[in-house]
Amino acid sequence: MPKKVVSIVVFPGSNCDRDLDIAVQKYMNVNTELVWHDDPNIKNQEMIFIPGGFSFGDYLRSGALATKSPAMKEVIRLSKKGVPIIGICNGFQILTECKLLDGALIDNCKRLFICKENFVKIENKNNPFTKNIHKNVVQFPIAHAQGRFYTSEDNLKRLEDNNQIVFKYSSRDGKINKSENPNGSMNNIAGIINKNKNILGLMPHPERAINFSEDNDGISFFRGLQNLL
Amino acid sequence: MIYRVYINFKKGILDPEAEAIKRTIDSMGYKTIKNISKGKFFDIEISSSKNTLGDLEKISSDLLSNPIIENFKIIKK
């Protein structure tokens, strides 16, 4: 049987698309197609990834200009049909700017670009993206300057009530508190899903946790996504 | 015709850049500065007056600002 094909949308300034490509092919056992941002057609609709980087130089706001790309218009259309979509780092910023996910990702509270290994607790496994990860705390690196998750108090409550918060920054043993919050995100939020559970956005980089980090937790993340295909 | 679109953070959102600028001004010895809010503006030249404000409102809310975190204001220059 031929392998399924997963799409990765690439923008001018994306820089995690190749790492993601390797991780997806190797651990999801699929082929990939890189879709350039000005292509209005996304042929392979099994699953769509929006990679990290600095789309359009992060001009205006991170992810803002990418939302108007022809490929993103198609992503928005396909998202309504239930196609699984995952945005990592800049991809998460793009998905919030598109309003496919709640909230906004703004300057880290200390304005530093933070690049380091980090632990995130999986807050919710009642969704197709994390249900197959056995661990409760995973080690995924972060690398961002605008990763502080912000939303209104009402929206935050809604996210919590609907179990849409999937990842929170934590200690190695899963403690969630201010000292484990690298960027000032509300309630340590590192990743969320939409209400229909077909769109995931996360700031940490699982595609960078497949070779070098202690536990290679990215492998179980990508392997776990195979159930969506 | 030129319009200016001002964008700034909504109240209550921590802006670390504005805070750092405020701290520097404090260190310069000025005692009366209570608060600083940082923003940006765009000067937009328009060729026709038809639907101008409507279009500008849409552009401002749909692209130039993010309504979750920012307010915008349009003035004619």
Image (cartoon, rainbow, N blue to C red):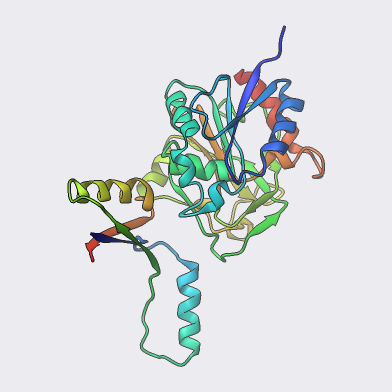
Q: Where residue B67 sits in the image (x, y, percent)?
A: 34, 50
Asked which quadrant contains residue A144, the reply is bottom right
Q: In which quarter of the image is the N terminus of chain B?
A: bottom left
Q: Relative to residue B7, is residue A130 drawn left or right?
A: right
> What is the x, y in percent for residue B16?
49, 68
Q: Can residue A66 be seen in this view?
A: yes
Residue situated in front as seen by the camera: A97 or B1: B1
Q: Judge by depth and name the residue closer to the eye, B73 or A41.
A: A41
Q: Is residue B65 visible?
A: no
Measured as percent of width and height from the top left, residue A147 is found at: 55, 53
The residue located at (50%, 83%) in the rendering is: B24
Instruction: Please say if A214 is above or below A108.
Output: above
Q: Is residue A22 left or right of residue A44?
A: right
Instruction: From the viewer's side, name the closer residue of A193 and A55.
Output: A55
Q: In this view, does A136 lie above or below A26?
A: below
User: The C terminus of chain B lies in which quarter of the figure?
Assistant: bottom left
In the picture as drawn, the residue positioned furthest to the top comes out as A1
Q: Residue furthest bottom?
A: B29
The spot of residue A170 in percent (x, y) is 64, 50
Residue ranking furthest to the left: B50
In the picture, measured across the screen, residue A14 lies left or right of residue A135, that is left
Residue appearing at x 38%, y 44% in the figure? A155
> Which residue does the image show at 45% across and 40% down from the upper left?
A67
